[in-house]
Amino acid sequence: MNVLSTVKLTHAIKEQLANHFPIITFFHDLKIDEAEQLIPRADIILTYGEDLVEDHIKAATNLKWVMVASAGIEKLPFDILKERKILVTNAKGVHGIPMAEYCLAMMLQVSRQAKALIENEKQHNWDRSVKMNELYGKTVYILGTGAIGSATAKLSKAFGMNVVGMNRDGRSVEHFDTTYKKEDILLPVKDADFIISVLPSTSATKSLVNETFLNTMKSEAVFINIGRGDVVVEEHLITALENNKLKHAVLDVFEEEPLGKKHKFWDMENVTITPHLSGITDLYLPRAIDIFIRNFNHYLDGKLTDMDNNINLVQRY
């Protein structure tokens, strides 16, 4: 059995895989376009999901399973995968801790005026008039109550925040004080001090954060997006920020990436930009590989239904 990995793995992880699966042949550290001769031999492809196109799947005549070492799968060639009945799993769950920490860091950054403090330090300016706010007692509204949303809710509760969530059906979720269904998405907006979107890119989530949503926010509120860029109508967000409909936006994801050098966001003082790295830490890849190893054991035992994060190729999540 052959595993083709286009994910760049550390030497320690390669040894870990070899020790767990000594009779499996692994082809490591190959870009997909450099692996033309190996693709037809691959039974399994380990990928971040952004490099595979339909022609690769057609050429992979032995392919039975694609493991995506991230949560995002929207760029996969779903039609051919569905036609071929290829098993697809992802690394959903690995982002919970790092992305929750990112959200808390960014809420603190805005509340404690980190940008102003750093600028004062650069200017050797001893200014004690910088206004500081606490997270304690504030309300955070989290769009999406899955692994990332729940981890963010848990950390937010540790800071004494009121935590409100939104999911498809309004079901109760641990660490959330209240949850709303998608149809009622606007109800908590006006009372939220922070709104965090962890939503994936689907037909149901595109453009959810639009003019109506943003105009419902209170002027001192902060919006954070760590989900997918197309959940937000960027033109509407720019207008809302320019008209002080909200205080600040922290954006890790965008409609088009990388963000163009001339994009208006770069020069807006009330915007914090990070280059889609909220979930990337030193422990990210080891967590993803742990999921792969567990799933591979189930796969070899023929227990496909026991594998974690099986993707529905029709619903695409």
Image (cartoon, helix red, strand yellow):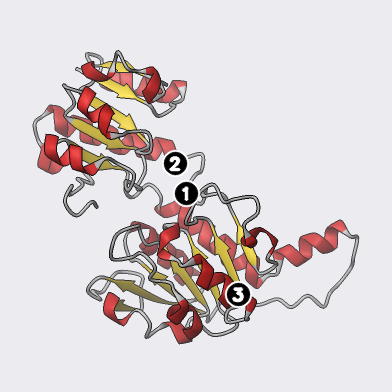
Q: Earlier in the sequence, mark 1 or mark 3?
A: 3
Q: Are marks 1 and 3 in contact (CB under 8 Å)?
A: no
Count of numbered circles in the view: 3
Q: Earlier in the sequence, mark 3 or mark 2?
A: 3
Q: Secondary structure at mark 3?
A: helix
Q: Are marks 2 and 1 in contact (CB under 8 Å)?
A: yes
Measure the alpha-carbon separation of dots 3 and 2.
33 Å
Residue at 49 percent across and 76 percent down: it is 161
Q: Are marks 3 and 2 in contact (CB under 8 Å)?
A: no
User: In which quadrant of the rendered view does residue 1 lie?
Assistant: top left
Measure the alpha-carbon separation of dots 2 and 1.
7 Å
Q: Secondary structure at mark 2?
A: helix
Q: Nearer the viewer, mark 1 or mark 3?
A: 3
Q: Position of residue 42 (x, y in %)?
A: 23, 20
97 or 115: which is nearer to us? Answer: 115
User: In which quadrant of the rendered view does residue 212 lie?
Assistant: bottom left
User: In which quadrant of the rendered view does residue 231 lie?
Assistant: bottom left
Q: Residues within 10 Å of mark 3 (few under 14, many from 20)?
A: many
Amino acid type for the residue under numbered disc 1: Gly
Q: Position of residue 289 (x, y in %)?
A: 35, 34
Residue 235 in sight from this viewpoint: yes
**Above or below for 258 versus 300:** below
Measure the alpha-carbon separation of dots 1 and 3.
26 Å
State the residue position of label 2.
Answer: 284
**Above or below for 76 versus 119:** above
**Above or below for 133 versus 119:** below
Q: Residues within 10 Å of mark 2 (few under 14, many from 20)?
A: some
Amino acid type for the residue under numbered disc 3: Leu
Residue 181 in sight from this viewpoint: no
Q: Nearer the viewer, mark 3 or mark 2?
A: 3
State the residue position of label 1.
Answer: 279
**Above or below for 14 versus 175:** above
